[in-house]
Image (cartoon, rainbow, N blue to C red):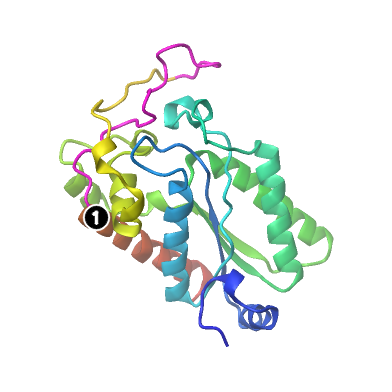
Amino acid sequence: MVDSVFMAELSWPEWQQRVADSAIIFLPLGATEQHGPHLPLNVDVILPTAVCERVARATGGIVAPTIQYGYKSMPRSGGGQSFPGTTSLDANTLSLALRDIIRDMATHGARRFVLINGHFENSWPAVEGLDLALRELRRDGITGVTAMRLEYWDFVRPATLDRIFPDGFPGTELEHASLIETSLMLLLRPDLVDLSKVPQEGRASFPTYDIHPAPPGYLRASGVLADARGSRAEIGQWLLDDHVELITAAVKKEFGL
């Protein structure tokens, strides 16, 4: 038997056996989106996949292929639609894709799922996709399917954030392509990070509302919303340790492991 947590590397009988043994399916939800001049377009793919891999190893799970495209990036959390290379899905498209994936796996025996989101705007389309899948499975007489849905960045200790941001955490939205994501990428894929191109703009400031289309000067020209200066792989390790430990504990609690 192949010793891998990645579904794509298993044969169908191996997948079938693991699911029969109650393996949890971890589904990373990513995006192909600008992350400033110093980071690649696949940051939101790499980070949730890394978290899923480590939690799956700790819980005997399987990591399904990562969703590579996400819902449209909004101006106050990246503004990716204004940047070349950002390639997004309509909310309905993403929801239906998730519905189909979950429904198909459940039809073949999977009963436990964990959706780990790596792109801010995916949250509500993922809720809709999960709801549609469960509704159709119940309609077809397939019961006993249980799913968790979470954002990996919510699983971090306050003490860790205080250690990283002694002057105050700017918030998840403003951390787009900033210290947290850059530090995690320095840990996981330093070959894709160019610190010489980190912008020097500091923290962005937005009103508490959106304007569509975004007026001139509303978006950050670099696509970076806070400050990535001072990013280190060590910081990335602090964060990843928290993410994996706390998510693993939550998964074990909810699924009785």
Q: What residue type is labelled 1?
A: Ala
Residue at 65% over, 84% down: 17
Range of the magenta residues? Answer: 209-232
Instruction: Identify the residue shown where x is 67% and y is 45%.
Output: 95
The residue lying toward the viewer, choosing from 233 and 28, is 233
Q: Position of residue 176 (x, y in %)?
A: 38, 37
Q: What SS does tag 1 mark? A: helix
Residue 215 colored in magenta in the image: yes
**Viewer-proximal residue among 67 and 208:** 67
Q: Mark 1 points at which residue?
A: 233
Q: In front here: 98 or 193? A: 193
Identify whether 207 is placed above or below 95. Answer: above
- Asked whether the viewer can see residue 106, the reply is yes
Quarter of the N terminus within the rendering: bottom right
* Magenta span: chief secondary structure: loop
Q: Is residue 83 left or right of residue 184?
A: right
- Which residue of the protein is positioned furthest toward the bottom in this rendering? 1
Location of residue 31 in the rendering, given as x and y in whole percent from the top left corner: 53, 45
Tell me which residue sits at (76%, 68%) in the image: 107
Q: Nearer the viewer, residue 178 or 57?
A: 178
